[in-house]
Amino acid sequence: MSNSSEQSTESSGLSPEQRLEPSNTGLLNAGIVTIHDMETLRACVAYENTHQNRVQILRRLEHRASEHRKEEG
């Protein structure tokens, strides 16, 4: 077992469904802000478009993508 400092913080630990389905908005927001790669962001947008299509969630995902691009650049 690895210690907590060695554990990966990559966002691939949660599925789009796990990130976007909590009824608690705090958990939902946490699921979005902890996305650290574009692949996961794209998967979450695709999931949201297919299952819920909530404009506010899609805007949050768009904002996170913008933040990620700034972090990369």
Image: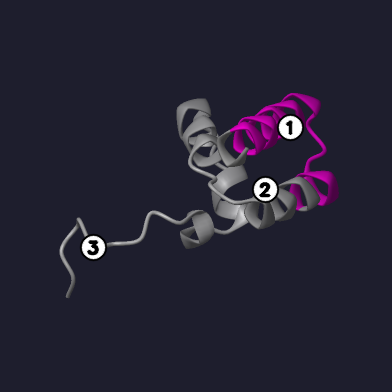
Q: Residue shown at 28%/62% (left/top)?
A: 7
Residue range highlighted in magenta: 47-70
Q: Quadrant of residue 4?
A: bottom left
Q: Name the quadrant of the N terminus.
A: bottom left
Q: Main secondary structure of the magenta part?
A: helix
Mark 3–mark 2 Cα distance, whole angstroms, equals 24 Å
Q: Residue shown at 61%/30% (left/top)?
A: 67
**Vertical comparison of 67 with 9: above or below:** above
User: Label 2 belongs to which residue?
Assistant: 41
Q: Name the quadrant of the C terminus.
A: top right
From the viewer's perspective, is 44 left or right of 18?
A: right
Q: Secondary structure at mark 3?
A: loop
Q: What type is the residue that disc 2 sits on?
A: Leu
Q: What type is the residue that disc 1 sits on?
A: Glu
Per the image, is 52 magenta?
Answer: yes
Q: Residue shown at 71%/55% (left/top)?
A: 43
66 vs 55, nearest the viewer: 66
Q: What type is the residue that disc 3 sits on?
A: Glu
The tag earlier along the polypeptide, 3 or 2, is: 3
Numbered badge on residue 62: 1
User: Label 3 belongs to which residue?
Assistant: 6
What is the crowding at mark 3: few (fewer than 14 residues within 10 Å), some, or many (at least 20)? few
